[in-house]
Each structure stands twice: as structure tokens, then as C-alpha cells.
Image: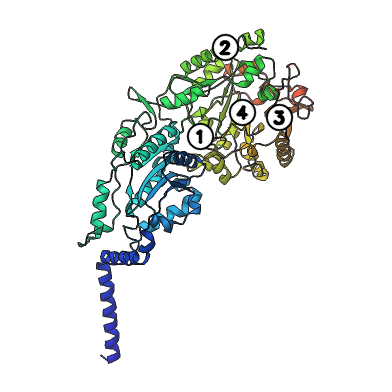
Amino acid sequence: MSPSARLTLLSLLSATATLYFLYKSRNRQRRLLTHLRRAVVGTHCHAPPKRGKLFFLSQTNTSKVLAQRLHALLTLNDIPFDLVDPKDYEPEDLCKETLVLVVASTWDNGGPPHDGAFLVNWLAESADDFRVGALVLKDCRFAVFGVGSGSYGETFNAVARDVAAKLRKLGGRELVELEEGDVDLGDLNGVFDRWSQKILEVLNGNLKENEQGLENYVVESESEGDFSEEDDDEVEESDVVDLEDIAGKGPSRRSAVAAKANGAVNGHTVNGEKEMVTPVIRANLEKQGYKVIGSHSGVKICRWTKSQLRGRGGCYKHSFYGIESHRCMEATPSLACANKCVFCWRHHTNPVGKSWQWKMDDPLVIVDTAIDLHTKMIKQMKGVPGVKAERLSEGLSPRHCALSLVGEPIMYPEINTLVDELHRRRISTFLVTNAQFPEKIMSLKPITQLYVSVDAATKDSLKAIDRPLFGDFWERFLDSLKALKEKQQRTVYRLTLVKGWNTEDIDAYSSLFDVGNPDFIEIKGVTYCGSSATSKLTMENVPWHYDVKEFSEAIARKSDGAYEVACEHVHSCCVLLAKVDKFKVNGQWHTWIDYEKFHDLVSTGEPFTSNDYMAPTPSWAVYGAEEGGFDPQHTRYRKERHHKSAR
């Protein structure tokens, strides 16, 4: 072997030995790098600040509002903390912190909110980087509160759990255990307040920190003994609080698993059966005026019912379809929904779910109880100024049922039996579905008028507005429209316009017309229902009536004559498009319904179509009429508005 070849071989053997040594000594190398890092940055990392940091990872302001509340509580108790938006924070500075509190929401597909992504990713990368080491946060005490929705299954509070695990892996020690709040259970504020109180007591020195296992972990990391390969594995998480039990103290992870096996999670269990409406949800709904029926249904008196009892005008359904608003019952057989829409006027106090998983009440009992509760609410209107005795008497016999109160009616397994019972009593049905259960739409029996909510026209905007639980929500949405197309009775696309969210998608909306081929398209401006921690909507997102009209006229033009603007109800900021070839007869619109004819047709059991029970639309309800959709037989009442004058 030549000298040069021998030299090359020796070099290769030397390099191989070096690599082998580095491989076998990973942990020793990590310790060396850790000590080197300390030597370099120790001068500033071991100068702890006087103030703690309170981070909020928030997408819809829920976590932000909670963090602000905790910050106010800490300030009130003279405990200095900075309220921090993670997008304005440099994660490398975490090594300087001695106290860190995190309120973290879980967002899209179990990921963090946009503004918190950089911080969460930094934690993940640092925790898995052997060069950083497990002691970078050894002087830091932390606590994490998670905000999530139990209906999302495996990704429930995934961000909070991950943040807590990574902070532990980097050497941080918990002030109190991870707490997990569930927005679906209705007691998020109560759960958060109890966690905040624990934080306050620990910081005030009134409770001993739960850190025994963590101390052991830190001591082991700082020992000079040999390391095994297993030392590189992630430290096993301690038990965390899984707050599914909203009635009291949350169970540990182990007890939560046992509870789930017994069917007690995500619902109120009575006699071994899980009920949809927990005591907290029931209390929230009743506070909003709902009458809860059994374990999963509800009824509520509509403000337009009260208005027409007083002769002050009916709702848009009176103008568009001829219902008698004072004889309309607003109800639902399922308070649960598969969406968490940004414009939900219940502020997400109702349950959510992707399938029926609760105790089921008898449909005949639901109908009987709904009518009984409805008539009791009507009777309470007796003596109210302006209530007409004749209308009050008529109101005690409901003739219409709007199955659109809250939730998703077609989730109820006995929806067809319930509808049959309403029709048997000659009560018409207006059923609204959120387009996530196409198979349920296909199996529905004839409905007086069947609606599908079309809240957006593209996949991305639908996801942003409806915030659906299903991963295949767009496919379900399109299949629901296709199922609607097969129906022979009256069908409607229901569009809710949210300014700044979905008012620019005219071309995309028009492309959906052929998919479901609806008889009508209702276009309504979103109703602002006050501030909510679960929604970013403000009055700026509410369109004016002229905005709705312009959008409706543009949509009609895109249909190439298939649809025209037929009716409007100015008071409701609502416009109706109708199919010209079906409902415009000899130049006159026939959007109203012959309800008696409908019930006669249903009772025969024979097939029939929407043309068989249409009726002429009165002139005052037609688009462009001077009355603006207000029935001239009623008295227009305008509230006095007392605004402060500008000075």
C-alpha cells in the first residue's frame, strides 16, 4: 500500500471513530453543549425579571378575554404580570422568565391560533433539539389553561396539552396542573375562574406547589452519572385535568377515561343514559328564554309572534309565504349542531356533535310538550298593551312550525315521525338544515318548505364562517345541495350575508345554483346579537338593506333569467329570489303557500310537487312595492330612538 493510500485509510478510520464516539456519547455531548450555552448566555438568562408573563393564544378572542380577566385579578392582588400577545414576543427570551401563564385555544385541525404559531413551533423545535437541553427553563414556573371544543375529539385542547408538555420537557415546573376548558359544556367561565383562583393562591403562597415528580426529573438531569438512550425520550406527562365534568372539580386523565367508558363524558348522565342538555347548558338556554323539552328539544316564542299578536306586522315568512306569524311555533327536536358558526345568535351555548349519541325522547311527547309550552307563552301575552283578543285566541292554535330555532333538526333520528305528527295536526313545517347531513336530507319525508343554509360559496370561506366539525365538510355540503335537488316539494337556499366575509363571492354563489336547483333563494343580512367571546363580528359586519338588494340583484343577473327578485321585507333586511318558470304565472308571482291544499296533498300519501300548493303573492309583498313587504292591514310601529346629539 502506498504512503498516500495508507494516509487516506487512516484518515477515514479516524473520522469513523470520531463519529462513533459522538454517537455513543450523545447525552454527554448534549451536557457539554448545555454547559457551553450556559457559559455564553448565563449572564442574562439568570437575571430573572420582576414581572411574570401571561400569554394568550387566541383566534376568536375567547382566550384573550379570559387572559385579560386573569390579568385584572392579578393586578388587583398586586402580583405584577405583563399581558403578552405571542406575535409580539421573542421566544428566545423565555429563558429569562421565572413565571409564565398561558391561556391557549386550539384552532384549525388541532393547531395553534395564527398569532401563537411561532411561539408554539419554537417550543416544539427546542424541546426536540438536544443542543438546547432540558434545563433551559429550569428557573421557570408555569401554568397552562386550555380552551377547546370536546366535539373535535382527538384534537380537543391539543395546543394546551402540547405547550404544557414542551414547557415541562424544557425544564419548566408547573404551578398547578394543566386545566382544560370545554366551550361546549357551557361553564367555561366557571372552570377558568376556579383555575385562576388556584393560581392566585399558589402565587400568594397559600398552597404547596405540586412539583415532586418535576423536582426528581430536574435532579436527574443535573446529575453527573451516565445516561442511557432512554433519557432522550420525552418525559411522560403527569395527570392533567380533563374538565368534562362541569358540575364540580374536573377529573384526572385516568378518571376521565373511565368516565368516557361509562358514557358520562360530553353529556349529562341520568340512570346510565347520556342526556344532551347538561344542567349548565339548560340554565344558559333558559336564561335566553328557551323552554327546554325533555333532554334534547326546545321551543321559544318569536318576537314576530308577539308583534303580530299586537297587530304590528309579521315576519318575512308572512310577506314571502303567507304564514300567520302569531300562529307560528319556533321549535327544534335537536339542540345540538355540527357547526359553530361565527354569527350564531346563541353564542354557542348549545351542544355540538357529529352524530346522535344521546338519550332519545319520544317524538309525540316532543310535539305535545312543545305545543303546550308554546300556548302557555302565548297566554302570557294576555293583557300586554295592543294584543288583539282575536289574534290571541288564534295564537293558541299554532298552524306553522319553524324547525329552525337552534341546532340541527335532522340529527334527531325520529325527525320523520315528528314531522308526520305535525302534519297530522295540520301544522305546516319550515325545516332548516346546515348542509352537513346529506343522507338525512335524502331520507326526509315531504316538508312544507325545506331550507339548506348556504353560508358561503367556497370551501375556505365556508370553513371560516361555519367552523364545521366534520373534516369532509365541503363534500357533505355539496352532497346536501345535490340531495335537495331531488326533493319535489318547495326548497330554499338560505344565504346569510356577513359584510367582509362572504359578500364578494357572487360568481361562486351562482355556480352553486345548478347543484341544488332550489325553488327559492332567501338572502338576509346577518343579525348582530351583541358581543361574544366566540365571535369577532361587530356592527361593521352587518349589511344595510340596500347592500342586500344590490347583492340579490347581482345574483339574479348571474342566473341568466332563471331567477328574479320576487319579494322583500325591509324590516328584516331580507330579499327573496324565485324561479321564474315555476312561480311567475302570467306575470304574477306565486310565492305564497296554500296551506290547506298542502295538508290535503300530504294526507293522500301520493306524490306531489311545489307547484301543486302555490298561491298568489299580494302586491304589497312584491319586490319594489311601496310597502316594502309590510302588510298594510297591520299598524307600523316605530320605536322612538333617543340618541345623544353631537355637541
Q: Regarding mark 4 in the picture, which secondary structure is present there?
A: loop
Amino acid type of the residue tagged 1 in the rendering: Phe
Is residue 83 positioned above or below 545 on the image? Answer: below
State the quadrant of the C terminus.
top right
* The quadrant where residue 317 appears: top right
Q: Earlier in the sequence, mark 1 or mark 4?
A: 1
Q: CB of mark 1 within 8 Å of CB of mark 3?
A: no
Using residue 588 as the reference point, say whether residue 275 is left or right of it: left
Q: Nearer the viewer, residue 199 or 427?
A: 199
Image position, residue 174 (x, y; %): 33, 46
Is residue 624 positioned above or below 82 on the image? Answer: above
Q: In this figure, which residue is indicated by the disc labeled 2?
A: 380
How many residues crowd around disc 4 within 10 Å: few (fewer than 14), some, or many (20 or more)? some
- How far, Cα to Cα, is label 1 from label 4? 19 Å
Seen as rendered, the residue at the extreme left is 225
- How far, Cα to Cα, is label 3 from label 2? 42 Å
Q: Earlier in the sequence, mark 3 or mark 2?
A: 2
Q: In this figure, which residue is indicated by the disc labeled 3?
A: 582
* The quadrant where residue 314 appears: top right
Image position, residue 279 (x, y; %): 41, 24
Q: Earlier in the sequence, mark 2 or mark 1?
A: 2
Residue 488: numbered disc: 4
Q: Nearer the viewer, residue 541 or 320?
A: 541
Q: Regarding mark 3 in the picture, which secondary structure is present there?
A: helix
Image position, residue 81 (x, y; %): 43, 46
State the quadrant of the N terminus.
bottom left
